[in-house]
Each structure stands twice: as structure tokens, then as C-alpha cells.
Amino acid sequence: MATNLRKLRKYLLPPAVLIFALCAVLTYLLRGGFRQFEITPYKVPPAAFTNWNEVLNHPQDISLVTLQTGAIRMDACLNLDPASPKQMECDHAPRNLAALVHWVHHPRFGDFLIDAGFDDSFAKHPPYGNYTEAMKLFNWVNARSHRRGSRIGSTNRAHFLQAEPSFLARAAVANHFSGKTKFSSLDFLAAPRMAPLGASIDLFGDGSLWAISVTGHTDDDIAYLINGLQPVLLTGDASHLEWAFEAGVAPRGWNKEGTARAY
């Protein structure tokens, strides 16, 4: 009996050690997913308009400046629908894709950043800066590198989320919010639907800045309309490559349902 137990331990010990090691590595890589944020609902003011014709016919005193904070070198077709037959037409050569930050100024409500771009860690610790280990591994596997560009300060006025980030989302980007734990969530389920763009929130209640739900590439994608003298729609990841927009190829989602929503 004792001999059989020793043989059993001999055969079971290596797999057990391997499983333990794999679990330890996965926990280390995904530990950002265990981070929690303090999220409170954003109090949405009553919308000033009910359709886009009214909105665009009443431009507001709001300005937009777009700056480049770095570049991502990668195959630009990597994040597109891999099942699309048009992928064969896409140039899969690596190129530098601009990492942009959009500075919005409102004379009454102040200054806001839409997508904060790269911070100093990408200059101090190239090429992946403050990415979590999981994101560093993902970028290394996909031959993505990052180059820091011009410096820009960040504001703490508001951090908008569409919903509680999923475990995988936190595992990917938790380090981006170092020192920032308080967020405001945007409830698009209660927002009015304004065709053809769907659920839209008039953030200031004066028609100047709109948040628009564009779930697809990820479940919490948000686009923004800056309704100044020259209106600008920031699509974000709803459409992030000119060729794909013109060819009708959507960004790939986390799953098939996400890619379908992206279309």
C-alpha cells in the first residue's frame, strides 16, 4: 500500500507543481483585475435637445484641441474583424499609429481630457510604460511597441466610465489609473436614443458635449460629439483606421457578438 502511495505521489507531483506554477503566473499577470474602483453615477442634466438636427443647428461655445502624445507601432489590421474577406486587401505592414489626446474647453465647466494618451512612464520605461504585465505580454506577442511623444498634463476633473470595468478590462488597464480611484459612471440604459447614433448623453445640458454609447470593440466604448462652430465626432475605437472605415471593416470585439455590434 505504501509503495503504491509513493508511486502515486511520484506521478502526481510534477503535474501538481506545474498547475501551481501556471496559476501563480496567471495571478501575477492578471492581478490588476482584482483592483476595485469607487464608482458613483454621474448626475445627468436634462438634455437641451432631442435630435441631432437641433443640436447641430445650435453650436455652442466649446473648443477642441487634439495633441499627439506618442505612437503605437503595429500591424494596423490587427484589431480589425479577422473574418472579413476584405482583410486580404489590408496592408499588414507595421506602421506608426498616432496616440491622441483631445483637450476640450468649456467656458463655464472648464477643461477636460478625452483619452489621456501616454504618460511619462512610456519615456522612462519603454516600450510599454505603465501597462500591466498582461498587456505587456499581449503587446509583445503581437509585436506592438510604443513610443512616447509630447508631454501633456492630466486633469482630475472627471473620469467617466460607461459601466463597472470587467475583470479582464481591469487586468489590462488598471495601472493607467494609478492614484485615481474615483469615477463617474454614465448610465446609457436610461439615456435617450437619438437616431442614428443610439443612446446619447448631453453631459452639460447645453448641447455642447455629448457622450454616445458605441459598444462593439469593447462593451464600454464611448464616442464624443463636440458641438462647436465646427462640430467634431470623436469615434474612438468605434472606428480607428481610415482604410477600415472606407472599406466597411469593423474593429474586432472581445467575441463574435462584440464584432457584430461594432458593424
Image: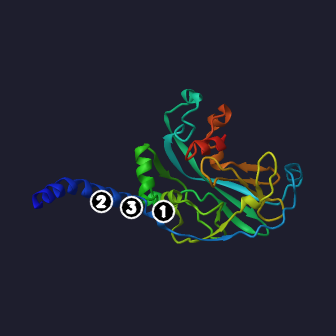
The reply to whether the C-beta atoms of the residues labelled 2 and 3 are less than 8 Å apart is: no
Label 1 to label 3: alpha-carbon separation: 9 Å
Answer left or right for 216 relative to 203.
Answer: left
Identity of the residue drawn at 57% across and 47% down: 98
- Residue 231 coordinates in the image, percent (x, y): 79, 50
Residue at left 54%, top 37%?
77
Give the side of residue 32 with respect to residue 204, left or right.
left
Few, some or many residues within 10 Å of mark 1 (<14, 14–19, 20+) = many
Q: Position of residue 82 (x, y in %)?
A: 54, 35
Say which amino acid is labelled 1: Gly
Q: CA distance from mark 2 to mark 3?
A: 10 Å
- Which residue position is annotated with label 1? 33
Q: Between 67 and 57, which is closer to the camera in this rendering? A: 57
- Mark 2 or mark 1, which is nearer to you? 2
Q: Based on the displayed image, in which of its 4 quarters is residue 206 positioned?
A: bottom right
Q: Which mark is residue 98?
A: none
- Quarter-of-image position of residue 186: bottom right
Q: Which residue is mark 2?
A: 20
Residue under the point 60% across and 63% down: 164
